[in-house]
């Protein structure tokens, strides 16, 4: 059985799309744990209508205060009964054969630790049903050792993955932290003993033009320093599982990349140019102190994951003669000065 954990916050416009895609699955042996995270719109009442219609399959819970995605998913993990765990975002939707292919593939390959499928970026659900008749590919079982490129190339989203419950053990998501998917996905991909990879267009990740996380890139983000919590968590989890030394270079790449993605965002912010350049300089300087320089990374892998404009901009950065604590202090002061 699969346990599908869905944190919900102010998603009234999209919940029906997700639940129609869930109830339309050709594989039926799954439970849905939908947790409303103190929404201020009609999300909870919509969830409750689905629960009333499918009481044996859909279980709705409600947080009395907003806990955030990580803490809400952790609550779902405590409630989950399935052999595999799926984490879906409330504004996305999935292919009708996604669970069937992934779970039956898992049984055929003796229950690998993680099963991954493909991800498609969409805007509205109505225009993507043509993908539903697309060619279905067979899965490929890999051992992470020797397959670094496949893992580095995998999406950081948790939505297109099934995680074996036994494999996860007591591991949880970072709480009150942005980009928690990035840490959770990559830490477990590099800690797994076996991974089944599909490349079917199964998970439809909705990109919003005017709202949501995907639209926040032009606005100053005071949670910017969370990127370092994410980077550190990848090392912590893989180290605890005895896998860090096997993949040290790959993990260093991922750690630096999550900071480079934030630098890319900062450079797009609609703020004073001098201030955003200073923030970008200090972000990279701190990443270099804590992890490594971009010049020490595999340049081919780096160029696959970050745009040339960002890399070119970093190569022009002035050298900062600051220690780690001073750099953090300067970053905290600059971020605190930002206005949303």
Image (cartoon, grey):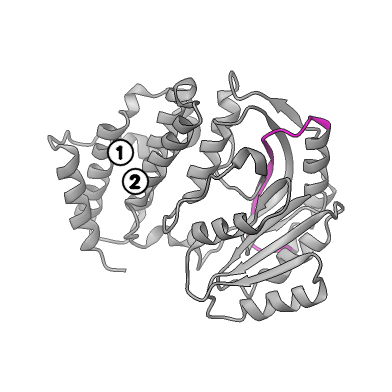
Q: Earlier in the sequence, mark 2 or mark 1?
A: 2
Where residue 152 sits: x, y (%)? 54, 31
Q: Is residue 272 left or right of residue 139?
A: left
User: What is the secondary structure assignment of the residue under circle 2?
Assistant: helix
Contact, mark 2 vs mark 1 (Cβ under 8 Å): yes
Q: Quadrant of the C terminus?
A: bottom left
Residue 118: image location, x then y, percent: 69, 42
Q: Which marked residue is nearer to the observer: mark 2 or mark 1?
A: 2
How far apart marks 2 and 1 lie (CA) works out to: 10 Å
Task: Tell me where the magenta segment starts and ends, as one range.
Answer: 108-125
Identified at 23% across, 36% down, the residue is 317
Nearest to the observer: residue 249 or residue 236:
236
The local crowd at label 2, few if under 14, some if 14 to 19, many if 20 or more residues have their Cα within 10 Å, is many
34 left or right of 323?
A: right
Q: Quadrant of residue 62?
A: bottom right
Q: Which residue is mark 2?
A: 263
Q: What numbered label is drawn on residue 225? A: none
Give whichever of 129, 116 is nearer the camera: 116
Q: Is residue 151 above or below residue 278?
A: above
From what the image shows, is residue 294 above or below residue 43? Answer: above
Q: Report the number of numbered marks.
A: 2
Q: Which residue is at a point 58% across and 41% down the rendered structure image?
A: 155
The residue that label 1 is drawn on is 313
Magenta span has 124? yes
Q: What residue occupies the far top of the structure in this picture?
A: 146
Q: Considering depth in this image, is 259 or 182 the residue closer to the camera?
A: 182
């Amino acid at each position: 059985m699969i346990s599908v954990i869905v944190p919900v916050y102010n998603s009234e416009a999209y919940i029906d799309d997700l639940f129609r895609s869930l109830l339309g699955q050709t594989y039926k042996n799954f439970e849905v744990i939908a947790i409303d995270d103190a929404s201020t719109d009609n999300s909870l009442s919509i969830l409750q209508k689905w629960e009333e219609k499918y009481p044996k399959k859909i279980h709705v819970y409600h947080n009395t205060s907003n806990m955030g995605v990580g803490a809400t998913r952790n609550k779902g993990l405590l409630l989950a009964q399935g052999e595999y765990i799926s984490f879906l975002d409330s504004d996305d939707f999935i292919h009708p054969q996604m669970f069937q292919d992934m779970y039956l593939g898992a049984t055929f390959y003796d229950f690998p630790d993680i099963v991954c499928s493909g991800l498609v970026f969409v805007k509205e659900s109505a225009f993507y049903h043509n993908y539903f008749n697309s060619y279905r590919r067979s899965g490929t079982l890999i051992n992470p050792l020797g397959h670094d490129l496949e893992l580095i190339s995998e999406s950081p989203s948790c939505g297109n993955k099934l995680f074996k419950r036994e494999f996860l053990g007591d591991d949880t998501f970072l709480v009150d932290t942005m980009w928690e998917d990035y840490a959770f996905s990559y830490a477990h991909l590099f800690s797994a003993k076996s991974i089944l990879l599909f490349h079917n267009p199964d998970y439809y990740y909705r990109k919003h033009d005017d709202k949501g996380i995907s639209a926040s890139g032009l606005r100053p983000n005071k949670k910017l320093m969370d990127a370092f919590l994410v980077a550190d968590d990848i090392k912590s989890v893989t180290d605890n599982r005895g896998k860090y030394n096997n993949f040290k270079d790959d993990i260093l790449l991922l750690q630096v990349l999550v900071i480079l993605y934030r630098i890319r965002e900062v450079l797009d912010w609609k703020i004073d140019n001098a201030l955003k350049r200073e923030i970008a300089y200090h972000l990279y300087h701190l990443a270099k102190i804590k992890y490594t320089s971009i010049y020490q990374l595999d340049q081919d892998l780096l160029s696959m994951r970050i745009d040339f404009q960002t890399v070119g901009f970093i190569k022009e950065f002035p050298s900062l003669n600051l220690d780690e604590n001073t750099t953090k202090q300067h970053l905290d002061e600059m971020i605190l000065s930002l206005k949303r």
